[in-house]
Image (spheres, rainbow, N blue to C red):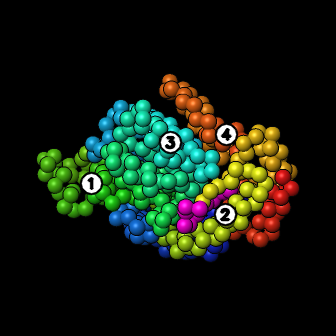
């Protein structure tokens, strides 16, 4: 069986041993030094000034949107574009926090939204922000999208939960907009079991993220900013630790997650490098099988954790899907398909735009694993199945 997820960690046994040792020797499990060190390491690795570690990628999205509202960068009722092929907790925070989500279709050969689609949408709808998803380690022309957003005053934020490490013209995905979110869930690139990160270079947004992550209090803020806030709000000493400035959550990670992040990040480039090589080999086989296949010629590094197989024709899709299942390969739909088809979205009483490419991906697509520990035997079997398809 070639499973979508096999082990909890890269270098699984070694990591578990290190975790046991850490637990034996520490008395601090709530957010502390390990989490702070992981934030520094992640920000450096990503090439961003600030990283805020949270309990999941979903909370990274929620905390980011709430912080944009708290800081006044977004207002309730603003229209925010989003990629229709995404994960539910990308668009859910927009709905939960009173923004108006506007879906964008994607291109079939990248699974991602393109500048052409953005331009078409902007010809009839004004957006305040665009919360783009970088789908499955790929991107379309996000550099052009970033330029359009800059020219039109649209705030660009990236959900990079599926694409840690992918590079377009040597710029890492997650560095094209004001802020970006990441997931460190076990099935993704770097496992802290559960976990997420928000990155930005904007100092004010960073301070808001720190407050929003933990109850809306000021305890995690830099000293100067904390003192300013206290004097502006006339807070006395007695109440200083129990004053809550902003709408917030408790989205703090634990030291176990911090420790795992610090341990796994040393392997991140190695894991991504292996996935890139697997992708090149397996995507070529997907194309040979007559599927649409991914065009990644504009990407200098593809950090992809599962290989999509999409057919234009549904009968071909069904035949190949069944062949994978018969040969013991675990498969699943592409992310959540077209989000507009999901029951939670239909309940929202929003216009259900026609998104022909997202519909093809929803109806005629599946994906199988691209793990860094896939063996040559695994890859041979996958290529053999595709050649028989
Ligand atoms: C695009 C996208 N955004 C957000 C998330 C949520 O991340 P998490 O599972 O860490 O909550 C996922 C999870 O798969 C995702 O694919």
Marks 3 and 1 sit apart, C-alpha to C-alpha, by 31 Å
How crowded is the residue under tag 1: few (<14 C-alpha within 10 Å), some, or many (20+)? few
How crowded is the residue under tag 2: few (<14 C-alpha within 10 Å), some, or many (20+)? many
Give the residue at x 73% y 56%: 287
How crowded is the residue under tag 3: few (<14 C-alpha within 10 Å), some, or many (20+)? some
Marks 2 and 3 sit apart, C-alpha to C-alpha, by 26 Å
Query: Does label 3 or label 1 sit earlier along the sequence?
Result: 3
Which residue is labeled 3 in the image?
117
Tell me: residue 63, above or below residue 28. Answer: above
Which residue is labeled 1 in the image?
204
Marks 4 and 2 sit apart, C-alpha to C-alpha, by 22 Å
Query: Does label 4 or label 3 sit earlier along the sequence?
Result: 3
Marks 2 and 1 sit apart, C-alpha to C-alpha, by 39 Å
Query: Does label 2 or label 1 sit earlier along the sequence?
Result: 1
Give the residue at x 25% y 62%: 222
Which residue is labeled 4 in the image?
360
Q: Mark 4–mark 2 contact, CB under 8 Å?
A: no
- Per the image, is 305 magenta? yes
Which residue is labeled 2 in the image?
279
Residue numbers of the magenta segment: 297-307
Of badges 4 and 3, nearer the viewer stands 3
Q: Is residue 34 visible?
A: no
Give the residue at x 54% y 30%: 353
Q: Mark 4–mark 3 contact, CB under 8 Å?
A: no
């Amino acid at each position: 069986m070639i499973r979508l997820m096999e082990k909890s960690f890269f270098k699984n046994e070694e990591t578990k041993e290190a975790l046991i040792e850490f637990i034996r020797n520490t008395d601090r499990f709530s957010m502390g030094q390990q989490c702070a060190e992981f934030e520094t390491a992640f920000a450096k690795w990503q090439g961003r000034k600030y990283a805020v570690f949270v309990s999941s990628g979903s909370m990274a999205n929620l905390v980011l949107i709430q912080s944009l509202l708290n800081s006044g960068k977004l207002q309730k009722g603003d229209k925010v574009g989003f990629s229709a092929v995404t994960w539910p907790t990308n668009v859910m925070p927009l709905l939960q926090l009173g923004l108006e989500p506007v879906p964008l279709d994607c291109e079939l050969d990248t699974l991602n939204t393109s500048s052409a689609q953005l331009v078409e949408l902007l010809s009839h709808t004004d957006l305040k922000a665009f919360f783009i998803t970088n789908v499955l380690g790929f991107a379309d022309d996000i550099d052009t999208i970033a330029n359009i957003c800059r020219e039109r005053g649209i705030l660009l934020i990236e959900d990079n939960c599926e694409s840690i490490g992918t590079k377009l013209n040597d710029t890492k995905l997650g560095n094209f907009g004001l802020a970006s979110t990441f997931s460190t869930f076990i099935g993704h690139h770097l496992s802290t079991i559960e976990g997420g990160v928000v990155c930005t270079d904007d100092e004010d947004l960073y301070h808001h993220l720190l407050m929003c992550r933990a109850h809306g209090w000021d305890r995690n803020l830099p000293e100067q900013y904390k003192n300013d806030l206290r004097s502006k709000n006339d807070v006395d000493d007695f109440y200083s630790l129990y004053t809550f400035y902003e709408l917030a959550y408790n989205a703090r990670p634990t030291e176990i997650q911090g420790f795992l992040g610090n341990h796994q990040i040393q392997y991140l480039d190695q894991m991504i490098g292996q996935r890139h090589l697997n992708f090149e080999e397996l995507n070529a086989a997907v194309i040979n099988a007559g599927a649409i296949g991914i065009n990644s010629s504009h990407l200098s590094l593809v950090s992809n954790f599962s290989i999509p197989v999409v057919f234009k024709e549904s009968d071909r899709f069904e035949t190949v899907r069944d062949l994978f299942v018969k040969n013991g390969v675990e498969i699943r739909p592409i992310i959540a398909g077209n989000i507009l088809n999901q029951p939670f979205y239909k309940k929202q009483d929003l216009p259900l735009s026609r998104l022909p490419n997202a519909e093809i991906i929803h109806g005629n697509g599946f994906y199988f694993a691209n793990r860094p520990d896939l063996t040559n035997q695994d890859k041979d079997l996958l290529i053999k199945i595709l050649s028989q398809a």
